[in-house]
Amino acid sequence: MNKIIQRRPLPENINLPDHFHPVIKRVLAARHVAVAAELDYGLHNLLPYTSLLGIQTAVDLLWEALTHQARILIIADYDADGATSCVVAIKALRQMGAQQVGFLVPHREKHGYGLTPEIVELAITDSWLVNTTPGNAPDLLITVDNGISSLSGVALAKQYGMRVLVTDHHWHRLNYLKLMLSSILISPVILFPVKVFVVLVLFFM
Protein backbone atom coordinates (compact mmCIF):
# COMPACT_ATOMS: atom_id res chain seq x y z
CA MET A 1 0.00 0.00 0.00
CA ASN A 2 1.35 3.40 -1.00
CA LYS A 3 1.51 5.97 1.74
CA ILE A 4 1.00 9.64 0.97
CA ILE A 5 2.71 12.17 3.22
CA GLN A 6 0.93 15.49 3.24
CA ARG A 7 2.54 18.62 4.65
CA ARG A 8 0.38 20.44 7.17
CA PRO A 9 -0.73 23.95 6.16
CA LEU A 10 1.10 26.76 7.93
CA PRO A 11 -0.58 29.82 9.43
CA GLU A 12 0.07 33.10 7.67
CA ASN A 13 1.28 35.05 10.70
CA ILE A 14 4.20 33.29 12.39
CA ASN A 15 5.82 35.36 15.11
CA LEU A 16 8.44 33.03 16.57
CA PRO A 17 11.90 34.18 17.72
CA ASP A 18 14.48 34.74 15.00
CA HIS A 19 17.05 32.54 16.71
CA PHE A 20 14.81 29.49 16.16
CA HIS A 21 15.97 27.25 13.34
CA PRO A 22 13.66 27.52 10.31
CA VAL A 23 12.77 23.83 10.56
CA ILE A 24 11.80 24.24 14.21
CA LYS A 25 9.67 27.23 13.30
CA ARG A 26 7.89 25.27 10.58
CA VAL A 27 7.25 22.27 12.84
CA LEU A 28 5.85 24.47 15.62
CA ALA A 29 3.74 26.51 13.25
CA ALA A 30 2.28 23.37 11.68
CA ARG A 31 1.13 22.47 15.18
CA HIS A 32 -0.53 25.84 15.59
CA VAL A 33 2.23 27.35 17.74
CA ALA A 34 2.69 30.72 16.08
CA VAL A 35 3.82 33.00 18.91
CA ALA A 36 6.56 32.65 21.53
CA ALA A 37 4.09 33.06 24.40
CA GLU A 38 2.62 29.66 23.61
CA LEU A 39 5.97 28.08 24.48
CA ASP A 40 5.94 29.48 28.00
CA TYR A 41 5.20 26.60 30.38
CA GLY A 42 5.24 28.69 33.53
CA LEU A 43 2.74 27.83 36.25
CA HIS A 44 0.92 31.12 35.66
CA ASN A 45 -0.28 29.73 32.34
CA LEU A 46 -1.94 26.66 33.81
CA LEU A 47 -5.68 26.39 33.31
CA PRO A 48 -7.75 26.39 36.52
CA TYR A 49 -8.28 22.82 37.66
CA THR A 50 -11.84 23.68 38.68
CA SER A 51 -12.81 23.80 35.01
CA LEU A 52 -12.20 20.04 34.74
CA LEU A 53 -15.63 18.48 35.02
CA GLY A 54 -15.93 16.06 37.96
CA ILE A 55 -12.67 17.04 39.64
CA GLN A 56 -14.17 17.98 43.02
CA THR A 57 -16.16 14.76 43.26
CA ALA A 58 -13.01 12.80 42.44
CA VAL A 59 -10.99 14.68 45.05
CA ASP A 60 -13.66 14.00 47.68
CA LEU A 61 -13.53 10.30 46.83
CA LEU A 62 -9.75 10.22 47.11
CA TRP A 63 -9.84 12.13 50.40
CA GLU A 64 -12.29 9.62 51.82
CA ALA A 65 -10.14 6.70 50.62
CA LEU A 66 -6.98 8.19 52.11
CA THR A 67 -8.67 9.05 55.39
CA HIS A 68 -9.90 5.47 55.87
CA GLN A 69 -6.75 3.83 54.45
CA ALA A 70 -8.76 2.17 51.71
CA ARG A 71 -7.20 -0.41 49.44
CA ILE A 72 -6.50 1.40 46.15
CA LEU A 73 -5.62 -0.31 42.88
CA ILE A 74 -4.46 1.60 39.79
CA ILE A 75 -5.55 0.04 36.49
CA ALA A 76 -3.02 1.31 33.96
CA ASP A 77 -1.97 0.77 30.36
CA TYR A 78 1.38 -0.29 28.97
CA ASP A 79 1.96 2.65 26.63
CA ALA A 80 3.88 5.83 27.41
CA ASP A 81 1.07 7.92 28.88
CA GLY A 82 -0.48 4.95 30.68
CA ALA A 83 2.79 3.92 32.35
CA THR A 84 3.66 7.51 33.25
CA SER A 85 0.21 8.14 34.72
CA CYS A 86 0.49 4.95 36.75
CA VAL A 87 3.80 6.02 38.29
CA VAL A 88 2.54 9.52 39.03
CA ALA A 89 -0.63 8.20 40.68
CA ILE A 90 1.13 5.65 42.89
CA LYS A 91 3.88 8.04 43.94
CA ALA A 92 1.38 10.77 44.77
CA LEU A 93 -0.91 8.44 46.72
CA ARG A 94 2.00 7.10 48.77
CA GLN A 95 3.20 10.63 49.51
CA MET A 96 -0.34 11.43 50.65
CA GLY A 97 -0.18 8.56 53.13
CA ALA A 98 -1.83 5.66 51.30
CA GLN A 99 -0.43 2.40 52.68
CA GLN A 100 -2.35 -0.14 50.62
CA VAL A 101 -1.90 0.90 47.02
CA GLY A 102 -0.80 -1.06 43.99
CA PHE A 103 -1.17 -1.30 40.23
CA LEU A 104 -2.25 -3.73 37.57
CA VAL A 105 -1.37 -3.40 33.90
CA PRO A 106 -3.55 -5.61 31.66
CA HIS A 107 -1.85 -7.92 29.21
CA ARG A 108 -3.39 -6.76 25.95
CA GLU A 109 -3.50 -10.24 24.36
CA LYS A 110 -4.80 -12.02 27.48
CA HIS A 111 -7.07 -9.45 29.10
CA GLY A 112 -7.86 -6.94 26.40
CA TYR A 113 -7.68 -3.20 26.94
CA GLY A 114 -8.70 -1.30 30.05
CA LEU A 115 -10.84 -2.31 32.99
CA THR A 116 -12.33 -5.48 31.56
CA PRO A 117 -14.32 -7.97 33.67
CA GLU A 118 -11.27 -10.25 33.51
CA ILE A 119 -9.16 -7.56 35.15
CA VAL A 120 -11.77 -7.03 37.85
CA GLU A 121 -11.71 -10.74 38.64
CA LEU A 122 -7.91 -10.71 38.65
CA ALA A 123 -7.90 -7.77 41.04
CA ILE A 124 -9.96 -9.84 43.47
CA THR A 125 -8.22 -13.21 43.24
CA ASP A 126 -4.61 -12.01 43.23
CA SER A 127 -3.19 -9.40 45.57
CA TRP A 128 -1.64 -6.52 43.66
CA LEU A 129 -1.59 -4.26 46.70
CA VAL A 130 1.32 -3.79 49.09
CA ASN A 131 0.68 -4.59 52.74
CA THR A 132 -2.43 -6.54 51.75
CA THR A 133 -3.02 -10.28 51.95
CA PRO A 134 -4.60 -12.16 49.03
CA GLY A 135 -8.37 -12.28 49.12
CA ASN A 136 -8.82 -8.69 50.20
CA ALA A 137 -10.31 -7.00 47.16
CA PRO A 138 -9.54 -3.34 46.44
CA ASP A 139 -11.95 -0.79 47.83
CA LEU A 140 -11.24 1.66 45.03
CA LEU A 141 -10.18 1.14 41.43
CA ILE A 142 -8.61 4.08 39.60
CA THR A 143 -8.12 3.79 35.86
CA VAL A 144 -5.44 5.88 34.17
CA ASP A 145 -5.37 6.34 30.39
CA ASN A 146 -8.31 3.97 30.02
CA GLY A 147 -11.80 3.31 31.31
CA ILE A 148 -14.08 5.28 29.01
CA SER A 149 -14.97 2.05 27.20
CA SER A 150 -15.07 -0.19 30.29
CA LEU A 151 -18.79 -0.29 30.99
CA SER A 152 -18.89 -4.03 31.74
CA GLY A 153 -15.80 -3.83 33.93
CA VAL A 154 -17.17 -0.93 35.93
CA ALA A 155 -20.48 -2.73 36.38
CA LEU A 156 -18.78 -5.89 37.67
CA ALA A 157 -16.55 -3.92 40.02
CA LYS A 158 -19.62 -2.27 41.51
CA GLN A 159 -21.24 -5.67 41.96
CA TYR A 160 -18.25 -6.66 44.07
CA GLY A 161 -18.61 -3.53 46.16
CA MET A 162 -15.69 -1.60 44.68
CA ARG A 163 -15.86 2.06 43.80
CA VAL A 164 -14.44 3.19 40.47
CA LEU A 165 -12.72 6.42 39.48
CA VAL A 166 -12.12 6.68 35.73
CA THR A 167 -9.47 9.10 34.48
CA ASP A 168 -9.19 8.98 30.72
CA HIS A 169 -8.41 11.43 27.92
CA HIS A 170 -10.16 9.39 25.26
CA TRP A 171 -13.71 10.13 24.19
CA HIS A 172 -16.87 8.12 23.67
CA ARG A 173 -20.05 10.14 24.05
CA LEU A 174 -22.46 7.29 24.82
CA ASN A 175 -20.07 5.60 27.25
CA TYR A 176 -19.39 8.93 28.91
CA LEU A 177 -23.06 9.42 29.70
CA LYS A 178 -23.40 5.87 31.03
CA LEU A 179 -20.24 6.06 33.13
CA MET A 180 -21.39 9.31 34.71
CA LEU A 181 -24.30 7.35 36.16
CA SER A 182 -22.25 4.41 37.44
CA SER A 183 -18.87 5.80 38.47
CA ILE A 184 -16.84 8.97 38.89
CA LEU A 185 -15.38 10.05 35.55
CA ILE A 186 -12.80 12.70 34.76
CA SER A 187 -12.05 13.40 31.12
CA PRO A 188 -10.42 16.57 29.75
CA VAL A 189 -12.34 16.26 26.50
CA ILE A 190 -15.47 17.33 28.36
CA LEU A 191 -15.74 21.12 28.56
CA PHE A 192 -11.98 21.50 28.98
CA PRO A 193 -9.87 23.53 26.53
CA VAL A 194 -7.06 20.99 26.12
CA LYS A 195 -6.57 17.23 26.34
CA VAL A 196 -4.20 16.97 29.30
CA PHE A 197 -2.91 14.16 31.47
CA VAL A 198 -5.82 13.95 33.87
CA VAL A 199 -3.75 12.22 36.53
CA LEU A 200 -1.40 15.19 36.75
CA VAL A 201 -4.35 17.51 37.40
CA LEU A 202 -5.98 15.15 39.87
CA PHE A 203 -2.97 14.43 42.05
CA PHE A 204 -1.01 17.67 41.78
CA MET A 205 -3.61 20.40 41.62
Image (cartoon, grey):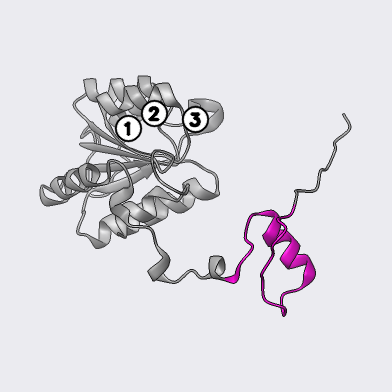
**Three-letter code for the amino acid on which mark 3 is drawn:** Tyr
**Image position of 119 (left or right of 127):** right
The local secondary structure at tag 2 comes to: helix
Q: Which is more toward the observer, 191 or 113?
A: 191
The residue located at (38%, 27%) in the rendering is 176
The alpha-carbon separation of the residues under discs 1 and 3 comes to: 15 Å
- Image height of 74 relative to 36, above or below: above
Which residue corresponds to the image point at 21% horizontal and 54% vertical from the top-left? 98
Query: Which residue is labeled 3 in the image?
Result: 113
- Residue occupying image coordinates x 39% and y 38%: 190
Q: Residue 123 — which label? A: 1
- First along the sequence among labels 1 and 3: 3
Determine whether label 1 and label 2 are within 8 Å by CB.
yes
Task: State the image coordinates of residue 115 (x, y, percent, origin top left).
Answer: 40, 30
Magenta stretch holds residue 16: yes
Which numbered circle lies on residue 97? Answer: none
Chief SS of the magenta region: loop
Tell which residue pokes out farthest to the bottom in this image. 19
Residue 1 pos. (x, y %): 87, 29
